[in-house]
Image (cartoon, rainbow, N blue to C red):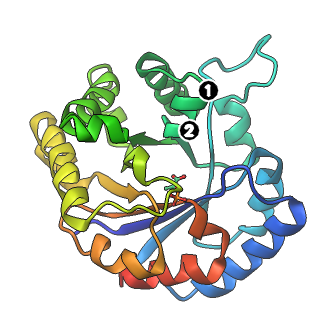
Amino acid sequence: MRKKMIAGNWKLHCNLREASDLLLDLRRLLSSMRHCDFLVIPPYTALSQAAQKLEDSRIALGAQDIFYEDKGAFTGAISGPLLKDVGCTYVLVGHSERRQLFGETLDSSLLRVKAALRAGLKPLLCLGETLEEREANRSAEVVLAQLEAVMRECTLAELEELVVAYEPVWAIGTGKVATPQQAQEVHKLIRERFYAQDAALAERIRLLYGGSVKPENAGELLAQEDIDGALVGGASLKAVDFAAIARACA
Ligand code: PEP
């Protein structure tokens, strides 16, 4: 059985003081929860401190983006080796805010996945359709194209390192959550694509749902057969809510 994962994307929130308080609360509230794995994804400025605060805990550390070159004249970019050095084990790739606001493309997601793997980081690949695309019945096509852009260039060993998050763009930060049935339908589709590659991989790979997950809706979402956890934005900034979401998948 796949162990569930609850990941918190803090986005552009938390100065060092706030990050420190949040991490201390999370350590306290999550320490006895063994039924799922935890990941926090603070802004870059809090990563070094977070790595220290999370030492000897069961909470893994991730970053919100990675540039696809390892070093060089790339002002403002962050590389895999630097993220690894600071203590990250995961990195988000293809978050819809990166795709929409920062011009990340299908090709550059692939390069980012490769850069993460080169550095020994696990890519948490985000996929999702916009409202327009859903209304035009194009959800499956869009999500599978985003997935394909990465899968077609990765070896089986590389794909084993991936975690995938289905995050419908219309549900991110909007308070509009996909129904458990809508989410399950897309998750099933994604898992079927992995089955076409390799059955054992498909059984193992974790597929998270993201988009306005809250303590009140987490239970039903996380009970779906192909939903193996949650990628949480807004609600991850409150330790009690993050812990309640984790409890919902017990
Ligand atoms: C996210 O940023 O990945 C996310 C799912 O945000 P929210 O939970 O706030 O919708």
Marks 1/2 in contact by CB < 8 Å: the verdict is: yes
Going by the picture, which residue comes out furthest to the right? Answer: 17
In this rendering, would 228 be left or right of 64?
left
Q: Return the mark for residue 102.
A: 1
Q: Does residue 58 appear in this view?
A: yes
Question: What is the crowding at mark 2: few (fewer than 14 residues within 10 Å), some, or many (at least 20)?
Answer: few
At 76% across and 60% down in the image, what residue appears? 50
Q: Amino acid at mark 2?
A: Glu
Q: Secondary structure at mark 1?
A: loop
Vertical relation: 63 (above or below) 234: above
Is residue 171 rendered to the left or right of residue 3?
Answer: right
161 sits left or right of 181 in the view: right
| Quarter of the rendering containing residue 73 | top right
Question: What percent of the width, then of the height, locates residue 199?
Answer: 11, 46
Query: 65 above or below 183?
Result: above
Q: CA distance from mark 1 to mark 2?
A: 7 Å
The amino acid pointed to by label 1 is Phe
Q: Note whether residue 35 is visible.
A: no
Q: Is residue 223 above or below residue 90?
A: below
The residue at label 2 has a CB less than 8 Å from ligand 1: yes
Q: Residue at x 69, y 39 (%)?
A: 83
Question: Please, what secondary structure does the residue beneath circle 2 have?
Answer: helix
- Residue drawn 32% across and 55% down? 206
For mark 2, what is the residue?
A: 97
Hey, which residue is sitting farthest top in the picture?
Answer: 73
Q: Is residue 155 above or below residue 216?
A: above
Image location (x, y in percent) of residue 4: 36, 69
Q: Quadrant of the C terminus?
A: bottom left
Mark 1 CB near ligand 1 (8 Å cut):
no
